[in-house]
Image (tube, grey):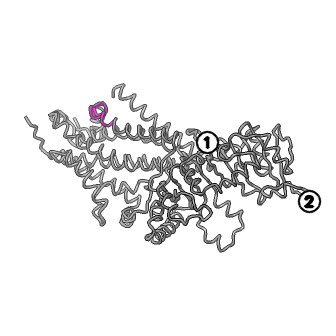
Amino acid sequence: MTNPSVLSSAFRVFEFSFGQMLWSRRSVFLGLLVGAPMAIAFAVRMVAVTRGLPVINGAGLSGATLFGILIWLLFVRFIVPVLGVFYGTSLIADEVDDKTITYLFTRPVPRSAVLLGKYFSYLACVVLLVLPSVVVVYFLIVPIGSSIGESFPSLVADLGMLAVGLAAYGALFAFVGAQLKRPLIAGLVFAFGWESTVLLIPGYLKRLSVAYYLQALVPHVMPADSSAISALLQVFQELPTVATSLICLTAITVGALWLAGRAVETREYVLEQ
Amino acid sequence: MTAKTRYFVIASLLVMFVGLGTGLVAYYVGFPATAFFNHSGPDELKYLPRNASLVGSVEVREIMASDLRQRLRQAMGPEQDTGRRQFQELTGINFETDIERVVGGFDAGGPAGNNGLVIARGVFDNVKIEALMREHGAQVQDYKGKRLVIADHFGDIDKFADPNVNPEPRPTDSSFALAFMEPGLVGFGSTALVQHAIDLHTSGGESAATNEELVAHVRALEGGNAWVVGRMDVLRSKTKLPEVVANQLPPVTWFGFRGRVDGGLQALVTAEAKDDDSANMLRDVVRGFLALAKLQTSSKPEFQRFVQSLQLGGTGKTVSLSLDVPAQVFDALGAALPKSPAFPNQPPQ
């Protein structure tokens, strides 16, 4: 009997873990997370119908601008890292906590295929929830003072960027989850401590973050103002090209997955009695 | 995969495909601006020509009743009522109470000096207005069942008063007309545009309300009680500006203004540049002027708050400048201005 390949084994793992992941208790949290922007968009739409949109930083808000702000602040800076941390770190850690990892590792499949299959489940799960949520937000917000046709290319770019971001964060935190004993804390510190800080520091340190490459793919520009902080940030603002960002994000995803696979293959998981 | 999971995947993909399909159709074919959003400016837009290069609206009653207006009225004293009374005597319209809203359009492609149209909604005494205009030499015609009061000149009462004094020929393309379109709705402006408004009123057709680009700009300025939207490039091409001046103007395609008058004044001026670089240049210029203004007013606290409320903003091709002046600033400005000698006994406001 020949051993099944990593990919076919990963597909088997994907098949059973996708439904398991989708209907887990964690999905309630995921539902709330992607439901919040839709609720906000609906509220904004109601306000716009009755009172018009407000002026922020001197810029008259249009639907397209507001959509860009929501994508940047809610999705790119919050939802995508949060999903990456909570799901990515739990791919292996949950099996360890539940003491069920032994059953997976005793199957005649490579250990890395278990991680890969679970990673693909995570990706399918979050992509199928987050991207439709973005589409709904888009159709609620953008028609307010903007043209759907004109801003459609930015929607496509946003969807692509979010999918790439979910893949990169998921892979990175899958590695953290496979390598560390307390991955959630390390993941949260990285996502909301390290990433937010290094983006503000001039120099090359920001290149050691995912957000740096991801923000180059965001087609929206935040409304500018004439404050000193804004001027300072513009001076230090340095963005990689789209091609560089895509290459780096792909490298992060593939590299993190490879390292996570290696960690799962070589690490001895000791189950607490 | 369980049936529940399968249904979830199908529903999720359906939302994606329907959304992206709709967006794709909109991208290639274009949707009417009102397909998803019906709040697209005042109804009177449908009487303005589609190719109007300047469109504006003023919520007259709202502004007249505002606190700021009442303060100004008290500050300026009874002399400002003279003009309003003269207007009322001439037209039978009390500007303070009778007019609810005025929407105007300007077609730069029309004959010079006679290409504007104003649509006013309010309470009008049709008989009195018509009689007053006839007294001043206007003639009444019937156009598609509507009474059209046509005058050859507007603004010079003497010319109206005695046609024999001014026996010069009256070209029809410079005549002004007033039409009672429906109860409470009056159209006034160039005869050709008023007739066009009646055409649109009776049989519909292409109007400013069906101009997608214009409507999108109007919607972007919602929230005020006065706004103006215009095509700078069209106005510039039709207006014979001196070359020196024309070369100095930034490459702006659309411009807009929104004002809200209540206790104070909030205003927003927007300009859509030709491209991002032009917008950045324009921002730099405005930023420079703002810095200069702040420098100039550093020793004048009564103006400082006014200048500090100016905020530069905008994204991409759009440049905006907003202003938020609370009522207290007007009080301070009023106190700083020299008192009028005409009303020495007036109490300070």
Q: Which residues make up the magenta segment?
A: A16-31
**Is residue A146 at all visible to an observer of this figure?**
no
Camera-nearest residue between A82 and B126: B126
The residues tagged by marks 2 and 1 sit, at their Cα atoms, a distance apart of 50 Å
**Disc ID at residue B167:** 2
Compared with A65, A270 (above or below) is above
What type is the residue that disc 1 sits on? Pro
Residue B52 coordinates in the image, percent (x, y): 69, 52
Q: What residue is shown with label 1?
A: B32
Compared with B99, A204 (above or below) is below
Q: Is residue A23 magenta?
A: yes
- Mark toward the start of the polypeptide (2 vs 1): 1
Q: Magenta-highlighted stretch: main secondary structure?
A: helix
**Placement of the C terminus of chain A among the 4 image quadrants:** top left
**Is residue B170 at all visible to an observer of this figure?**
yes
Camera-nearest residue between B144 and B290: B290
**Placement of the N terminus of chain A among the 4 image quadrants:** top left
Camera-nearest residue between B190 and A85: B190
Q: Chain of mark 2?
A: B
Residue A222 coordinates in the image, percent (x, y): 43, 55
**Residue occupying image coordinates x 63% and y 56%:** B230
Residue B310 coordinates in the image, percent (x, y): 48, 61
Q: Bin the neighbour count of mark 2 within 10 Å (Cα to Cα): few under 14, some 14-19, many 20 and up.
A: few
**Disc ID at residue A15:** none
Residue B59 coordinates in the image, percent (x, y): 61, 46
What type is the residue that disc 2 sits on? Pro
